[in-house]
Every structure is written in C-alpha cells, then in structure tokens.
Amino acid sequence: MTEPIKVLTANIDKPNSASIETYGDYAAARKALAMKPEDVVTLVKDSELRGRGGAGFPTGMKWSFVPKNAPKPTYLLCNADESEPGTFKDRVLIEQDPHLLLEGMLIAAYAIGSCPMGYIYIRGEFYFGATVLDKALEEARAKGFLGKNIFGTGFDFDMTVHRGAGAYICGEETGLIESVEGHRGQPRVKPPFPAVVGVFGGPTVVNNVETLACVPLIVKNGAEWFKGFGTPKNTGPKLYCVSGNVKKPGVYEFPMGINLKELIYDHCGGITGDRKLKAVIPGGASAPMLLPDEIDLPLNFDAVMKAGSMLGSAGIIVLDESVCIVDAVWRLAKFFAHESCGQCTPCREGTNWLESILDRLERGEGRPQDADLLLDMSDNIGGKSLCALGDAAIGPVISSVRKFRDEYVYHVTHKSCLPGTRRYRRLDMPVAAH
Amino acid sequence: MADLHPDNPYAKDRFPDRAKQVEFPPEHKARFEHLLTRYPTKEACLLPTLHLAQEVWGWISPEVVHYVGSLLDLSPAQVFGVVSFYNMYNQKPVGKYHLQVCTNLSCMVSNAYDIYDHLCDRLKINPGETTKDGLYTVVEVECLGSCGTAPVVQINNDYHENMDVAKMDALLPTLK
Amino acid sequence: MAKVTIDGVEVDVQDGINVIEAAKAADVHVPHFCYHPSLTVVGQCRMCLVEVEGMPKLQAGCATPVKDGMKIHVYNDKVDKARKGQMEFLLINHPLDCPICDKAGECPLQDYSFNYGSVESRYGEYKRTYPGMDRTAIGPHVVQNMNRCIHCTRCIRFTQEITETKELGFFKRGAATEVGVFPDTPLDNWMSACVTDICPTGALTTREFRFESRVWNLDSAESVCNGCDVGCNIFVGHRNGQVFRYRPRVNPDVNDHWLCDYGRFSHERYETDRVVVPKVRNEDDYLGISTWIEALDAIAVAFNGTSGEKIAVIASANMTNEEAWLAKKLFADNAGAATLDVMVDAIGPIKMKTRTEWILGTQGAPNFRGVQNVGVGAKTTKTVEQLMTEGAAGIDVLYICDAGFSDRAKDPQVIANLRQAKTLIVHSWDVNHPLNEVADVLLPATVHVEKEGTFTNLQGRVQRIHQAYPPKGQAVTDVEIFRRIGVKLYPAAAEFRSADVEEMFETMRGDVPALANVVWSDDGSGAVASQPA
C-alpha cells in the first residue's frame, strides 16, 4: 500500500500554519532570485511539472512562451478560482499555507521576467481564504519579501488578491483574464494566446495554486528530487480530492499516480454504508465517468486519459449504487448550464437543452429517442464551443449514456428511476430566478 | 424614456430612482481609492468596487449601478452586465442571513437537498425568497469548493461544513 | 501573400487575413453571424466553423488567420454536420415568427436556416422567452424583440467600438443571457439605427420602418444620402413612388457600413404634398396653374431684353453637378447673369466613420463643393447672403433654382427681401414652401431620389445617384427644366439639345478642371462612384 506523503501539505497541520513565522524566510525564493531567470525556467522544465489546474500542460514550457522585451509589462495570474465540482485542494493550501503559494508566485514572476504585479484570482466565496491571503501579503511586505528591491536583488514585485464573484467560467484562463480586467468572465477567442496578449494587453501567465505551490519545492530540492515522485512525464506530489459516497472524504497527498481503487478502498475507507460502487468521476465534474471495473489504474494525466477520461483537477467523486445516474448527470448538466457564460451558441443553447432533457427524463416524461439525441447533440457541442466548457459539459453526459444506457431506457419505459436508486431533489420545488 | 417606463413590466424593477443619491461612506471611499492604485486600468476595479458596494448596501441597486459607473467611467450597461453575470452580486435585497445551500453532486449525494427542502419548508418561503422578517434568504448555489466536507451551507461569508438537517435546525435559532 | 487551398481551389490571399475573407477570394461563402468586417472578432456564433487540415478540431473561420500552404474545407461532411448542429442550436429558442417579422426576406438567420438547417426540429422542450422584451423600444429609433436574438453581440460591439456610447450590453448569463439597455439609458446616439442593419435577425428593427412594408415588395436604387456633405452611400427602398427607407450601402472610403440617424430618416421630408404643375402669376396677380408652355413663355418674357446686370440666380447645394453646370451654361454663359451664387446651411457636425477614420459633415446639403467646382459663385456681383439680407431691389429677374436652397428661405423677412426683384422664378417640390406663394413663375421640381447625376462630397469624391422612381405629376428634373428654357431662349446652343446625364457629364468633364480625371462608371458594382482625382 502506498503511504500518503506530506510534501505540499507539510505545513498544514502545524499550529498557526498560515503565519510567516511558521513558514520560514522564503529560502527557495532567495535561492531563485540569485539564479538567472532563464535558469529557473529550465529548472522547472526539467522537473516535468505539469499544470495542476486540469489540462496538465508543462509549466516550464508555459513560462518559456512569454516573449522577452514585450512592449507591455508581463503579468502573473494565480488561478485560485477553484469551482470544479469535486475539487477542494487549493482551498487547503490557501487557508493553511498561503506563504507557499506566495513564494511560488514570487519565483514564477522572477522567472518569466518584467512582471511588476501578480494577481491572485480567488473565487468570491472563499472569503476567509482571501482574508488569509491578504494577511499573508501584509506579512511578506513587512519582511521585505514583496515590494521594491526584494532581497537586495533589485527585483520589484507585488501582488493583489482579486476576489471573483461567483462564476465557474472565470477558472478558464481567458475568462479569468477578462474578469481581472473588470469584464464579464467571457472567455476570449484564441489566438492570440494569453502568453502573448493577456491581461491589460501584456503577456500573461496563468497558473493554478497547486502548480505554483510546487515551484518553491522544486527550487529548494531540485528537479531530480521532484521527479522522484511519480513516473516520468507525470512527476511530483499531487493532491487528490475525494468526495461523494466514501467513508473518509478529503484531500490526500500522494506521489503522482496513486491507484484509484487503492485510494478509494484503502485510504478513504471504502464506500459509505459498504454499498457497491456504481461509478467514479476521476477528475472533477467534466471528466467522463469510470465504471467499477475500470478503476484499477494509476491516477496520473496519461493513464486516466488512456482510460477514456481525464485527471483534470483530480477531484474524484464517488457514486454508489443507490445514486440514480440520470439524476447525478442532470445535476452536473444543471451546473454547466448555469455556469455557461452564454456567449457562444453550442454552449449557451446546448447545455441548457441537455439539462432540459435530463430533467424531463427524471420527471418521467422521457422519450425513446432521448438517449440518442443526447449523444448526437453532445457531438454538436463537443469541440465546437469557444472555450472548453462545452467539452466539459458533455463529458458526464456522453459517458453515462454509453455506460448506463439501460438506466436511461428504464427511465423512458418505466417513467421512474431504477429500483434501488434514489433521486435526491424534490421535483415540485420551484426554481429560483437568478 | 417614456416607452421603457413605467408601462414596461421588464424595466419596472430595474428602473433607478435618480432622486436617490448614493455614496460610499468615508471608510469605503478610502478603500476604493486604494483599489485604484492596485490596477493599471480603472475598469479593472469594477469587481472589487461592487464587492465594496454590496458590503455597504447589501445589494446592487440600480442607483448603485449608476454610482459605480460614474466612479469608474463605465456606462450603466457595462456595470449591470457585470453585476448580472456574477452570482454573488445580489440584484435584489436579501435577508440578514443569506443561506446558500450547495447542492452540487458531492453535496447532493450527501443529502444537501434535504437541508435545502427543509429550510424552505421551515421558513415557509420559496427558493430565492426572503422571509417576511427580513432575516433569511434561501438559495441553491453551485459547488462551493468544499466537497470533502459535504454538504456545505454558506451563510453570508462563512462556510458551515458537514451539515445535516439536525445541525441546521440547531444553527437557525442562533442566527438572529 | 499566402497560397491557401479552399475547397480544392488554390488562391493567393494576403497573409494573416481570416478564413472568411480568404474564402471570398475563392468565391466560397463561409456562413457567419457574429463576424463583421468592421467590428472586432469574437468567434461567438460558431457558424463559421471550418476544417483546417492538420488541426484536430474545427476552427472558427473568423478567428483563424490564414498561413501559407493552409488547406481549408468549408464544405465537407464534418463541417456540414457541425454547421447543421449550430443552426439547430440557434433555432431551438428562436420563435420562427418570420411571417410577422420585418427582417424576413433579408434575414441571414432565415437564409442560413434555409441553406444549412434541418427541416424537422428535434427540440421537444419549451422555448425560452423574454417576457416584456418582445416589443421594447430601447431608443428613439430602435425596437427590440429579444426572443428573436441569437446573441451575436454585433449591436453591442457597434456601440462599444464605433459610437463608443456603450448603451447596449450583455446581461445575465448562460441560456438566460439577454442583450439590452440599462432601463434609464436608452440607445440614443446619432447612429443608433445602424444596429438594425447589422442585426442578423429581426431582433432589432427601426420604429420608422416597422410594419411599413415587406422588404421583397420594395425596389431598391443605389443613391447617395443628401442629408449632409459626407455623401453616405445608400440604397433607397421605395415602392410606387414612395420612399420607405434608406439603407447604408457599403463604401469603406466614405460611410463603411454605417448611416447616421439624421440621414437615414431624412427621406421623411419627402412625405409631403408635392408641387406637380407649373404656375404662372397672371394679370390679376393670381398665381394660377399653367402648362409648361405658358410657364416657359413667361420665363422667356422675363429674360428677353433684360440685361445680364439685372439677372440674379441663386443656385442650390442640393443640385447635382450636371444641374449646376447646365445652370451655369444657361444663366452665366448665355444669359450673361452677373449674379450666380450658391450657399449652404451649416449643420452638425455629424460624425461618420470610414473603415479607417472619422470624417465630419458640416454642411446641410450634399453638393456645395460640386456646385462651386463647376463655376457657380466664382464670378458674381452679389452673393446669396447679400440678396437675402440687403434685398433684391434693382434686380429684374431673380431665378431661384431650388426653394430649399437654405432653411432661411422660409423666413418672412428673407422672402420679402427676395421678393423685391421685379420677377421671381422659383423651382420647388414642397407644396408648403412659403416661397411658392410669392413666385411669379413656380416650376415643379424633383427631390434627389428622382434624379440622375452626381454629387461631390467633402472628400472631393464624385458619386452617382440613381433615379429611384420618375418625378411626380408634371415635375421634371432641374436638368430638364434648364434644357427646356435653354432651347426656348437659345435654340442655337448645342448644350441644351440633350437631357442625357451621361452625355452631359462627358461634356462637363472637358469644361471643369476638378472633374477632368473622373470617370463615369455604371457597372452596377455598388460603388458607382467615381474616384477623386
């Protein structure tokens, strides 16, 4: 059995873990600022760190895309808009160990160059997290770790906590940029990519909280140490969030590539009430579902991709046999319909249509052609939308129709859920207008 | 414009009362001035300024839309576009305690809908409505990012985790 | 330059332009809603999805710059399926109320639905509606029906990028997203009605044209707006001798895709009773209906034996170049009139955006520069201003080529001053114009949509106007009036033989230096305007 590790989460159990006294004096940042910026980028490249926000893009490469000598200043944005259902890892880091994130941002800003300001885009609901970060920033400024001439190297950098206001789509890179600029969080059409033209017209790097938190560790311990966790191309410590019908939900840290089955049954204590497992969503709401016989796989970017799903943000939602799959998918479809920004056609109209059909199935008004319609319509959304939200919305729909088609058919023919499964909501509840 | 007001049902509740002048109190004014120094453009201060406004007035009224627009050189349509895009800006007054029940998948399978239904039944309001005494508003919200401690209810800015109906019942009387 | 292949056709296009523009070179139409050549690219409607070889996903044609060697498929099975899917999404919540929609017949959504859509609907849910937003006047000219909107944001981008007034915005999000104005900030700017042109559905229509006519029942003539000296290119939508609307005609150098509200609705001035017969003042000082022969006789009597010193002519900035030139031939060169001048009222300024820059219209008539160019006002004893303020005493014949030469011509004091001339001859089309009553000879004239000819705008650009419908009653164009008078008074003069505007233009070109390099073009390409020298 793989033992949990405490690398990213090394500080979180300490008393007063959020204070700079507990954290230390930014030794990694001191080390990085003594290096040449391009050497820091190379170091991160060598570590094979991949973005923890969902796409798994190599972080070092992302940094190296930023053009040197751009006419406008470069900006570093930290994506702390953690809104993917099933994901709650960043909140732990933000609230328990904010200085790890700040040090990571300081190093990242130094590495990408000519970056006067970093913004931490934290979702508006994390009010407490925002106050923790604000306090941490004050502490760091007081110590001279932020501001002008940091560590006497002549490097200037400051950060601002930017609170979102309740929009999942602002977790999308360009949606986040729009939101920082004070607009509606509608993702931009690409090209140009943010690394070239991002926030306020300058080159921009957007990194997830966990990604940035890995950076000080890499600088401190070296790329080889980092690669010691996990397998080649899928390196480093990783936070896994397990929720749903498990006995011990929570955030677990393992070397990248923990076995999913082991995670659920050994570390999380198995399924609530010792019921049978029905399905697992391995990477946040947008990841296609896995059946119980598909979960014996290592949780890293490539292996989950090979199994037809995605690791995403490693938000693992476990559903047991008592869950009506149509109801569960309806809830996710409702989420995506609610969070669609509304600018592009397939996502605006498609996500809402998906929700209507699934709702109708739950109400016993399903039609024989609904399952095929869901599949065909999903195909018209997938890959056609402006940003990735369209693709995200169809993940659970397509996989569930393919894998639980009998249950869909049962809803049509019997006008009710499968015996032994339950619907959680009350159908007579009026829907509040936004 | 005569055509939009007062006959048009669509515009009625959104029509600002120009006679009502709103202005930030000095403390918030100072915080707003500080915000302006943190961003390279004025427009970028819109989200934090609206957070400030909601702190002061509890909701973003049409008058506040005009006020914030005038502070940041934005048209009311731009400000209202942002207000109506983001969930957290209240477009109508809410109760003293804004009970936001997360019902997304992880919370749902942890029986969040029971809490939600119970709250509506107990307070005798429909979702999105405010009790007559102005104390509570119940809404269903999307994932609050606390799935490991589901179900979670956000009351104003505070998370209440690992909730159930009994805990909710115990909590309600303390919210006065 | 980039060599790209579009549906098997290899074309050379400018490097970096988008696929929609590049496809035009191959004569392939990429359907699109949100893309507009004069607005920023947002890639929202997803209608212009095309397949680019080597890219796994379909690409939005509007947001994909072409590179050398790119192979693009606008029509193949994969793209057709995607396009059909987007069309379905656009229509599931569209009311499909074409039979009562003003846009029907010229609606991109309707056209694309016909070309790329599906006959049967798979949508079995309730359609989304926007209660209270189905006939909302959102400004003095624009009416919104949100149910028909497909959220392309062209109108929003227009108010953000062209007028920069930002009245329109996206509100709410997801399927509930709506386009609207903030309630007490209506869409009220000087070009507001342009949003109805760029709207690809019937969501935005003008109050003025709403329910006036089905668009396929209208004839269309290419013309130039005569509201000011910018000379915006327009289509005149007309039927049975009545103008229903002006619509901008694309000319990137003048008005691009736009037309100001003042110009757009300036045809409303034509909705009045018209002077349709000549009138001559008889011995009893009664201005009575006459025939053209009687009117021309009366003019001949006035002119014959009157020395040029005693003849004054007020031309008008509303005249075409040809009319002005013929007037100069008739009055200055043949009759020897000492006074021949033109004036123009100041208005605005009205801003208009070409593709690249703003230009300012400051004159209340279309052709002041053109009339001056042909020589009117170059050599005159008195100016129009002097005639109006000091009076026309001592003038035997005062010939006013257009009663509407200035708004001040309605001022009773000005009228009294002008009336001091012994004989007053007036062209007029508006039956209510006060100058009509004091004229000795009143000739029925035409409005600009009834004329052929050219206007010269503030850039010096000579642009053609086309006759939309024939003049009313016995009215004839000014060219014809001057020709008739010319033939009557100077039968030997060659320039009055023909009323053919094109012939006249060729003669005029040899005569007027400013027009020497202008080429008459009538290729029907839409521009129909000759280029500035």
Image (cartoon, coloured by chain):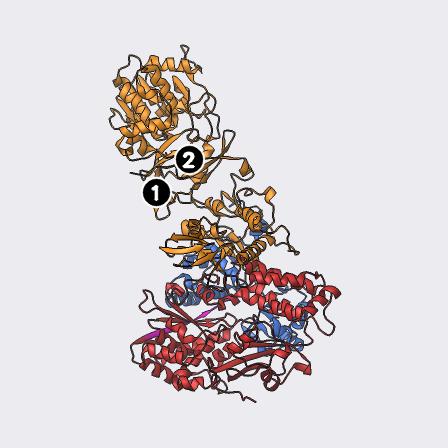
Q: Is residue C384 left or right of residue A382?
A: left
Instruction: Identify which residue is drawn at 40% across, 33% down.
Output: C465
Read off the chain for label 2: C
Report the predominant secondary structure element of the magenta stretch.
strand
Q: Name the disc covering residue C360, or none.
A: 1
Pick the front one: C324 or B54: C324
Q: Which chain is orange?
A: C
Marks 2 and 1, Cα distance to the nearest angstrom? 20 Å
* Image quadrant in which you'd find residue C524: top left
When the figure is inspected, residue C50 is found, relative to residue B3, above or below; the finding is below
Q: Which chain is blue?
A: B
When the figure is inspected, residue A231 is found, relative to residue C1, above or below; the finding is below
Is tag 2's residue or tag 1's residue first in the polypeptide sequence?
2
When the figure is inspected, residue A397 is found, relative to residue C87, above or below; the finding is below
Which shade is chain A?
red
- Tag 2 residue: C223
* Image quadrant in which you'd find residue A329: bottom right
